[in-house]
Structures are given as structure tokens and as C-alpha cells.
Amino acid sequence: MRPLQSPLQARQLSEYVCNNCTRQLRRQRRRYATTTLTTSSNPDIYDVVCVGGGPAGLSLLAALRSNPATSRLKIALVESQSLTPIRSFSLPPTQFSNRCSSLTPSSVRFLQSIGAWKFVKRERVQAYREMRVWDGVSGASIDFDTAALGPGGKDGVIAYMNENLNLTSALLQRIDELGGVDVLDGQKVADIRLGEEGEDVDLSSWPVVKVSGGREITARLLVGADGANSPVRAFAGIQSRGWDYERHGVVATLKMEGPGWGGEDHKIAYQRFLPTGPIAMLPLPGSYSTLVWSTTPELAAKLKSLNEQDFVSMVNAGLRLSPTDLKYLHSMPEGQTDEATWREQHTPFETNKIPQRVVGVQEGTIASFPLKFRHADTYIGERIALVGDAAHTVHPLAGQGLNQGQGDVESLAKTIEYSVTHGQDIGVQLSLEAYNAERYAQNNLLMGVMDKLHKLYAVESGPVVALRSLGLRAVDGLGPLKGFFMKQAAGTGVKVF
Ligand SMILES: Cc1cc2nc3c(=O)[nH]c(=O)nc-3n(C[C@H](O)[C@H](O)[C@H](O)COP(=O)(O)OP(=O)(O)OC[C@H]3O[C@@H](n4cnc5c(N)ncnc54)[C@H](O)[C@@H]3O)c2cc1C
């Protein structure tokens, strides 16, 4: 395959393909024009086919379309769900979807740079400026405040809580604004195979995606943004290794007694480590919070079976009572409310160090998700790139999964831009190496830390408890070290809106 003669020539083409292929493809298309485009012998040909219209896939498409260097690539999206309800996502201001993610300032900056952030409904996004983390066994705690970031960080933001649907809806609106993406939604990937060596053009290394509607499309570069059970990863024969945590993340939208101890302008995120897993309460606008309680599948099932009042009591208890008290409450078939109230009266805690009380839970928002650790052996193959959960799945205790996906997308879009502007084939493995090199090590490090944290806090007694408490107190007392951890978690922590 000969390289492009110049980046300008590449941009003059209706889509990016090298000169040799362009001539071949034009000949082929002239032939195709006389036949139907949906037969297996006649697949449609794209520069990029992205499977998966979640946060990672949609961000990639918006990034490619919004960059003049890559905006002429011919792109298709395959998504098994219908995107129509996501596009028009709308809920009353006091109702929130139960799938929320914390977006770091770096992710928000990226979303701004691709023009998607302006479509996010800001009134549904909640910034938080402080994070309080404590050990449910020993009581040792650490407070992260943006003041620890030093000059410039004082008025900053640690992260933004946002409904995943608010994000995907905004990304879809941005893609619609940019145009130029062939969207095949409501269509599952039925099969992926390699193309054929034809008379005019050799597509034998190009993946051909067959969707459930029967259409077949061929990809110069096939992107797997198709989540933890990625069919693209399976097609590429890339192993994904890891383990199940034997934990489920219970989520719910909670109504609180007030907007929080810091009021509307200084919202605080809370996380308490229990031996069964962390319970996190993250602020939403007004007097609402979102819950992520990682616990055993049995206890998750139990929590989901409770009536509203007992569920609310268990969440309040989870942030206040000892692991022994909680074990007893979990063993009760019902009536947790009276028992928890009595036990709380006999438990000392500093009220303003823990979240305000939960007073209700929004109907239909209690759900749970199995938690796993998985990391693909590589993020690339010949004409293959994996992004987001298709490449890595992590424990949500540090709220990083979606943010890691945004980092992947930013890096892959940059790699594709480089190939386009330097006359390289965007799909060959050599062109994709830079993406793998940049993201793999970075994600691996973060995933290792999150996994170790989960394991460290699963211990209930013995010297580990004393040591981890000592560690938390030491970091809490050392301003620069704390600042370092915060910068890792939040990017530079500077306010973005
Ligand atoms: C309880 C919980 C809390 C979390 N909290 C946070 C947080 O605070 N911060 C954070 O950064 N992350 C968080 N995460 C992680 C975050 O939700 C995920 O990392 C993120 O949603 C992954 O996005 P994605 O686009 O890679 O994959 P997905 O969102 O899984 O999207 C994959 C898409 O591919 C489509 N698809 C799959 N198979 C096919 C097929 N065969 N054909 C066509 N389409 C297909 C699916 O329909 C889906 O739309 C949390 C996760 C959990 C479980």
C-alpha cells in the first residue's frame, strides 16, 4: 500500500484512504453501485467502524469528527441498543438516573475540547470539592480538599458527578451536530470475520462486521468500545485476564435531609471502607446523592429485597455503625429500622464528619452490578483497537473506569490523527503502537493500585488494619503527599465551569 502523497491530498478525498486503495475502492464502488450494498459479497467499506455507543465509543466518534484532520474519515457506529431514547434523555430536576460517574477535570477538559460538554445539562451535574475517606474498622480517616493542591487548587474541583445518560446524550447531540457518522443502532454484532482477497482489492486483513439486521460493513480500523464482554476483542483473539471480586455494586438515588454540611457551594463525597467493600455516597445537585455500595452478592440481594424504609436505614447504618452491628442487621429478615436506630443511639460518631442522613430513595433506582477486574493483554491488533471497558474493567472504588476510557479515546484519536497527517494506514498495527504504548502502562498502574486498595481494606483484623490506619493518618498529615494523590485522582483539579 503506497503512502499518501500529502496530508492536503488526504483531506481532499471524500474520506481518508491511501491513493492506491482509493483508486481500487472507487473502481469497486462503481461496481457496487450497480448491485445491492447488503449482500455478503458486497460489504460497505469504512475507515473506522466503532462497535459500542457507550461513553467511550461516542467520545471517540465526536473526537474524530470534530478534528479537521480526521473529519473526512468515513465512520460507522454499531450499537445494539436504540439510541433514540438516549438522544432525548430528559428527567425532572429532582429525579436522577441511578448510573452516575465521577468525571475528573481532565475528562471534562477533553469533552470540552471535542465540543461535547456544551450539550451536557449542567444543572444535573454536581461538582465536589472535598472527599472524606475512612476505615470502617479502625476509624482512621483522610480528608481530600482541593486546598491540598496548592496555589490555584483552592477553588478547584476534585470531580464532577454526572449521570452516564447525561453524558451519552450530550455526545450523541454533538455527533448529530457534526454529522457524517453512519449510525446502525438497535443492531447487534452478529458476526465478525476477515474480508476476502478480491480481483481489484485485497481486503483479507480487513474485519467485516455483520450486524443483526443482515448488513455487512468492512473496516480499515475496527474499534471495540463494546464493553466488558467485547465481541471485537473476542474476534481479535485478545485475551482479557483478571478475576471476579465476588462483589456487587449496589446503586441507588438517595434523597438526603439537606444539601450537605458544606451547602450547595461546597459539596463533599464520602467513602467508608467496610470489610465487605466500600460504601460511597456521592453528591448530586440539591439534596440528592448517588450510592455505590460494594458488597457480597448475598448482601446485595438482601439490600435489594428490603422495603424503602429499611433500605434507607441500612444505608445510614452503613456509614455509621460498626461492621459487627452491620453483620447483625444484615442477618435480620426485616425490621432493620428500629434495630439500627437503637444501635446508633449507642454508637459515638462525629455528625459533621459523616454525610447527612438519607431520608428516602427514588423509586426504581435500586440496582446492582457484578464487579470484576479484567485487563486485555494488548489494546491493539491488526486493524483493531480496544477502548474503555473492552480493554479494562476496574473496581469502582476510585471512580476511574469511565475516566480511563476517556483517556484511551483521547490517545487513540491523537494516534489516528498522526497517521492521517503522516500518510500512514490508520489500521495497521504499527500505526496503532503509539496508542498501546501510551495507555497500557498508565492504566495498568492505576488498576493495580485500585485492586490493592480493595484487597487491603477487605481485611477485618490483625496488623494490616493497624498499618493501613497508620498509612492513612500519615498521608493525611503530609500535605505534599496528599496533594500528589489528589492530582493523580483529579488531573490538575482546576475548576472547568
Ligand atoms: C457501580 C458502578 C459505578 C461506577 N462508577 C464510576 C465512576 O464514578 N467513575 C468512573 O469513571 N467510572 C465508573 N464506573 C465505570 C463506568 O461505568 C464504565 O467504565 C463505563 O461506563 C464504560 O464505558 P464504555 O463505553 O467503555 O462501555 P459500556 O458503557 O459498557 O458501553 C458498551 C456499549 O457497547 C454496546 N455493545 C456491547 N456488545 C455489543 C454488540 N455485540 N453489538 C453492538 N453493541 C454492543 C453496549 O450496548 C454498550 O452501549 C462505575 C461502574 C459501576 C459498575
Image: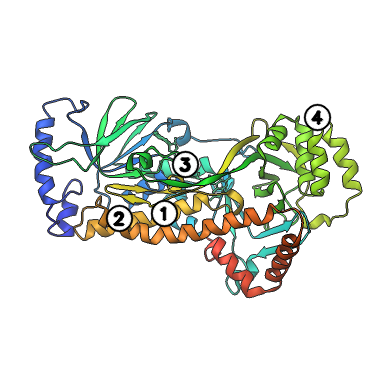
Q: Which mark is residue 408?
A: 1
**Which one is in front in this view, the residue at disc 4 or the one at disc 1?**
4
Q: Is residue 82 above or below residue 175?
A: above
Q: Which residue is mark 2?
A: 432
Residue at mark 4:
333
Instruction: List x then y, in percent, for residue 98.
Output: 61, 38
Q: CA distance from mark 2 to mark 1?
A: 12 Å
Among the two numbered marks 1 and 3 on one chain, the one whose residue lies closer to the N terminus: 3
Whole-angstrom CA distance, mark 2 to mark 4, is 55 Å
SS assignment at label 1: helix
Q: State the CA–CA distance, disc 1 to disc 3.
A: 15 Å
For the residue pair 241 and 97, the one nearer the viewer reads as: 241
Amino acid type, callout 2: Leu
On whether ligand 1 comes within 8 Å of the CB at mark 3, the answer is yes
Which residue: 34% across, 54% down? 413
Among the 4 quarters of the image, the one containing residue 251: top right
Mark 4 or 3, nearer chain start: 3
Q: Nearer the viewer, residue 449 or 126?
A: 449
The answer to which quarter of the image holds residue 473 is: bottom right
Q: Given the current orientation, which residue lies at the most extreme front position?
A: 462
Q: Mark 4: which secondary structure?
A: loop
Q: Is residue 268 among what the camera can see? A: no
- C-alpha gap between disc 2 and disc 3: 21 Å
